[in-house]
Amino acid sequence: FSDAGSSVEEMEFNWDEYLEDTGATAAPHGSFKHVDTSLQNGFAPGMKLEVAVKSDQNTYWVATIITTCGQLLLLRYDGYGEDRKADFWCDIMTADLHPIGWCEQNKKILKVPEGIKDKIPDQEEFLQRVLKGACSAPANLLEGLHRGKNPLDLIAPGSRLELQNIRDSLEAWIVNVVENVGGRLKLRYEGLEDSDKFDQWLFYLDPFLHQVGWAAQHGYSLQPPLAIRSLKSEADWQEILKQVKEEEEESSVPTDLFKDKPVIGVHSFSEGMKLEAVDPMAPFVISPATVLKVYNEKYFMIEIDDLRPDRTTSQSYICHVNSAGIFPVQWSLKNGLHLSPPPGYPGQDFDWADYLKQCGAEAAPQSCFPSLTSDHGFKENMKLEAVNPVDPEEVCIATVTKLKDSYLWLQLEGSTKPVPDCIVSVESMNIFPVGWCETNGYQLRPPRKRLLSLPCVPFPNLHFRILSSRTVHDGLKNQELNSSDSVVINGKYCCPKIYFNHRCFSGPYLNKGRIAELPQSVGPGNCVLVLKEVLTLLINAAYKPSRVLRELQLDEEAAWHGHGETLKAKYKGKSYRATVEVVRTADRVADFCRKTCIKLECCPNLFGPQMVLDKCSENCSVLTKTKYTHYYGKRKNKRIGRPPGGHSNLEVAMKKPNKRRKRRKHFFVHKKKRSSTSVDNTPAGSPQGSGGEEDDDQDEVDEESLTEDSTSEHQDELLEESEVSEKKSLSSSPTQSELSHSLAQDRDKRKRKLRTFSFSDDENKPPSPKEIDGQALLLLTLPTVQECMDLKLGPAIKLCHHIERVKLAFYQQFAN
């Protein structure tokens, strides 16, 4: 089998469509604790600060942070207790805000606001009481260059950090931040400014990454790693270190930024102990390993066992008690996993008892290892985004293929080079929720489009039997070839290479720019699969994919002798499906391509088995669109709507033809039970009880039962393009009128059925409009919107964009 078309990638990957096509679910956002930590802005509810009093700008009073929202703080003056009527929003960038103690240091007046003057008879005693043990807002986020910035943004390109060398020693060396992607840092060793060969990617909370000055404070020396030490002389390295110390103030990162790093505990390992381990640089197998060296109570070195006498390298790395990928002896056996014997081990049946006796070693006791948990939210077949361990520059789509305790086996899709399933901890900082790359403007490696292209063979009736179940996922639709399927391939069914001749006239339906981005050719291979791929590429290159799909759809009353294939188009958030005829034999391919081109009113040579090198034989370049259409005899007054031959077989996954608005799929599906006091997530102005939820449920019903309710969908889809002409067509035919009446009754029945279970009890009823809380709306973030409102990624991002606009308008008008 060859992967023709495997180099063709999705021009624009969409997680929602991908999850829908694969039938998978996204791993819950709350399972990625390091990402949640990175979203915090440095301020927390309960922190106190000194704020200018609005009625008297020359005086200040203590206020408590009630909640935060980006660079907005909701504050309450101390003295109001639980009374929220005087709460007010402040913009950190513009408001007169200061840490506790600022007024005393700068000779400013602390004075009780007029609204609570009667409640505080003794100001001094009150301040002593409320400030005792209080936590002040961070001064560096209220003043100076860092004011109003997200703490994560303070790690800007050019910032310096210290990185411990985990391969051969605990010595640290200075690294420069080259790039910061949502807290994932691209780091380059100081002194290697012109070389990216030794660059590393680490999340900013990595336990081996520290602020400048950490090594000196903890008794570690600053030395370049052995891998780069020979690139410069010792004098050069010392000069670099001297320069770094002189510029420390300019490039340092605030210490507060690392307050949420995991705390490294005390270990109880001893040299020579045996265990099972996963090499973090190649996390594909579990192997026997040895504690090679103990540095101190926090750090020890592990080496992956290798029994070959002629080995020249070793796989060793430094660990701490909470390091991922270290397990007690027999952990693999107890969990039904394969333990890879050490290279040079005699035989394949590895036995720990014999191995320990052979090595004269003892197994590390269970008490040395942290307890593992299964309470993490991940499940098999869930999707997420993960770093490729072979090429850390790549972040790929990942599928959970297996779970054991707090470890995941991930299958990466779209990596430049295929890699085995990766073994990662659920607390790994190299895994991210669906949509993380899009949110942070980083390129996610999309899945390669694979076409099962069966080779042309000169032998007649040669059979290829698929020996195992295989999924062909090429963005068209999943097709399962089972072990019982037998694919007959010979010259008759082998499609030649189909060329896209970009210089030819593209016609009124196809976008010339998108046509130019198509691959030069597809195939050769099985006729049906190659032509299906070609048609899908054309549909996606159209101005309106749904219109091109309509032009290509199968005329059910016409005589046809090909093969019916279901193709899919998406346009303005709506999904369309139709059966399209493709030919099965090679002798009909050229004619099929030519007729399809004419059907799309483009040059007959736009695609086909013939490559156009310089000049098209149809001389299409000299004809205007009007002349070209007339030349090929297309009817001018072609009515958009129902094709000849009864009702259309085009299916659409939308049920709201009369509403000219972009669809927000599954926008407010109330799945979770909510108390009567819960915040209403419905946007202000949206109708309550008028079928909003009903319409969304109806969309879901339609998408799940296109085949069963296809005639109803035909009706709505045809109205989508031309309501007026279609209504005339329906009224002119008695049978169509009866059909319309029947379909209307079906829709009413479905709506009544949906109403009966939309809100079955008081807990599930949507909150009344009285409870709408504008402050809660401003606090919504992407993770909150996705988890609390049951939204998919696409609608969630769009909603958050609107919230940001409302938020900006709000604090521009009302913030201090």
Image (tube, helix red, strand yellow):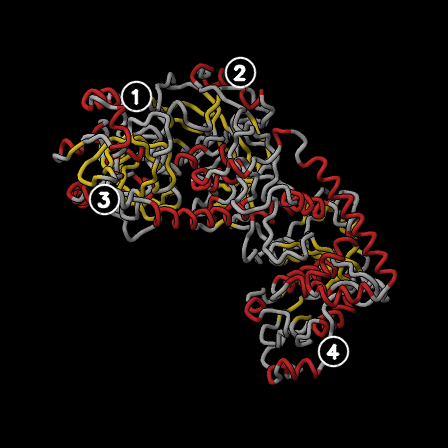
Instruction: Pick whichever of labels 3 and 1 is earlier in the sequence.
Output: 3
Residue at the extreme front: 118
Q: Quadrant of residue 608?
A: bottom right
Q: Quadrant of residue 515?
A: bottom right
Residue drawn at the location 43% of the way across and 37% of the way down: 35
Checking the image for residue 296, the label placed there is 1
Q: Amino acid at mark 1?
A: Asn
Instruction: Pick whichever of labels 2 and 4 is earlier in the sequence.
Output: 2
Q: Is residue 574 left or right of residue 119?
A: right
- In depth, the one of 537 and 76 nearer the eye is 76
Q: Is residue 279 left or right of residue 712?
A: left
Checking the image for residue 353, the label placed there is 2
> According to the image, label 3 marks what residue?
251
CB under 8 Å between callouts 2 and 3? Answer: no
- In depth, the one of 600 and 749 nearer the eye is 749
Instruction: Pick whichever of labels 1 and 2 is earlier in the sequence.
Output: 1
Residue at the extreme left: 107
Numbered-mark total: 4
Q: Provide the secondary structure element on which disc 2 rests.
A: helix
Which dot, 1 or 2, sits closer to the camera?
1
Q: Find residue 801 and report its horizontal and vertical position in percent.
A: 46, 49
The image shows residue 18, relative to residue 600, as above or below, that is: above
Q: Is residue 389 left or right of residue 527?
A: left
Checking the image for residue 635, the label placed there is 4
Q: Find residue 566 and report its horizontal and vertical position in percent.
A: 74, 56
Instruction: Pick whichever of labels 3 and 4 is earlier in the sequence.
Output: 3
